[in-house]
Amino acid sequence: EWESQGKPTVPVVDSKKIYLELPAYKIIIKEKLTKGQARYNSLIVQATKTYKSKLKDLSKKHNYIIIVEKGGVVSHPVEDVTLHVIALLKSTSNRPIRR
């Protein structure tokens, strides 16, 4: 259901903006963790699972067949759904497991 003002659109997201809102990713930033560290690896896996889960929830809610990274579609109208994903994150509890 990619309709915006009667014209078909492709839903797009800005993944960086979404990751910055993920609790597990916020810990990575706060603790200044880097790739290769065990804690970083654990938290980025958790953040990615949450991100994918929220994209799936949004897809089901709006009957999207595909959601594309912002900038990935250039010759077709798009609809930025980034804020919808962030709203889903904030509406549910996604607390990372602390060690």
Image (spheres, rainbow, N blue to C red):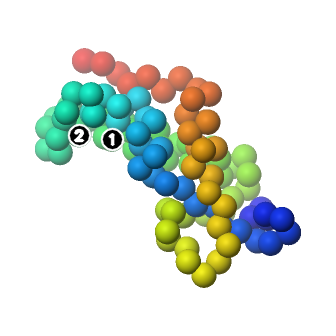
> Which amino acid does the dot numbered 1 rest on?
Val
- Can residue 49 be seen here? The reply is no
Q: Looking at the rendering, which quadrant does residue 89 occupy?
A: top right
The residue sitting at 60% across, 44% down in the picture is 83
As drawn, 15 above or below 45:
below
In the rendered image, residue 19, in percent from the top left (x then y), is placed at 42, 43
In the rendered image, residue 14, in percent from the top left (x then y), is placed at 49, 54
Dot 1 surroundings within 10 Å: few (below 14), some, or many (20 or more)? some
Helix, strand or loop under label 1: helix
As drawn, 30 above or below 71:
above
Helix, strand or loop under label 2: helix
**34 left or right of 50?**
left
> Which amino acid does the dot numbered 2 rest on?
Asn
Which quarter of the figure is the N terminus placed in? bottom right
The residue singled out by tag 1 in the image is 45
**18 left or right of 84?**
left
**Cα gap from disc 1 to disc 2, whole angstroms:** 6 Å
The residue sitting at 62% across, 57% down in the picture is 80
Q: Looking at the rendering, which quadrant does residue 87 occupy?
A: top right
The residue singled out by tag 2 in the image is 41
**17 left or right of 32?**
right
In the rendered image, residue 74, in percent from the top left (x then y), is placed at 56, 77
